[in-house]
Image (spheres, helix red, strand yellow):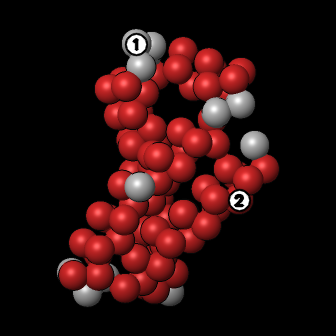
Amino acid sequence: MKNKIEVLLGFIIGIITSVFGCFLFILLFTKFTFFAGIELMQAEGKLGKIITLGTVLDLGVFWTLLKLNKEFMARGVILAVILLTLITVLI
């Protein structure tokens, strides 16, 4: 049961990290606010690319979790990346 909770926690951490990466990218590289940037990117069909760039931060989280011997949490981060990949392909 503890392993499932760790995987779920890693999944949540992976999703939050990706959203934070998208937030940083939009604020640093566009002149729009976060929500306006998301709407604009969706209208232009570039939302999948923004999600992909936001997911790059998950690499650091994954590496950190492995160094801390939190393998099940790292698996959750990988599951989040897989889910975000599927969302990106479907958008």
- Picture residue at 50% right of the left edge, 72% below the top: 78
Residue 36 appears left or right of 57: right
Residue sitting at the far right: 90
Q: Is residue 16 visible?
A: no
Are the residues at dot 2 and dot 1 in contact (C-beta closer than 8 Å)?
Answer: no
- Residue at x-position 61% and y-position 56%: 84
Badge 2 density bin: few <14, some 14–19, many ≥20, Cα 10 Å: few
For the residue labelled by badge 1, is the local secondary structure a helix, a strand or a loop? loop
Image vertical order of residue 32 relative to residue 72, above or below: above
Of callouts 2 and 1, which one flags the residue occurring earlier in the amino acid sequence?
Answer: 1
Q: Nearer the viewer, residue 73 or 49?
A: 49
Residue 32 image-quadrant placement: top left
| Whether residue 19 is visible | yes
Q: Nearer the viewer, mark 2 or mark 1?
A: 1
Q: Which residue is mark 2?
A: 86
Q: In percent of the image, x 64 and y 33: which residue is there?
A: 46
The answer to which image quadrant residue 24 occupies is top left
Residue 61 image position (x, y, % from top left): 31, 65
Residue 14 quadrant: bottom left
* Figure disc tally: 2
Q: State whether residue 37 is above or below residue 64.
A: above
Describe the element under mark 2 as helix, strand or loop. helix
Label 1 sits on residue: 31
What residue type is disc 2 on?
Leu
**Label 2, label 1: how far apart the Cα atoms are:** 28 Å
Residue type of the residue flagged with mark 1: Lys
The residue positioned 75% from the left and 43% from the top of the image is 91
In percent of width and height, residue 64 lies at 24, 72
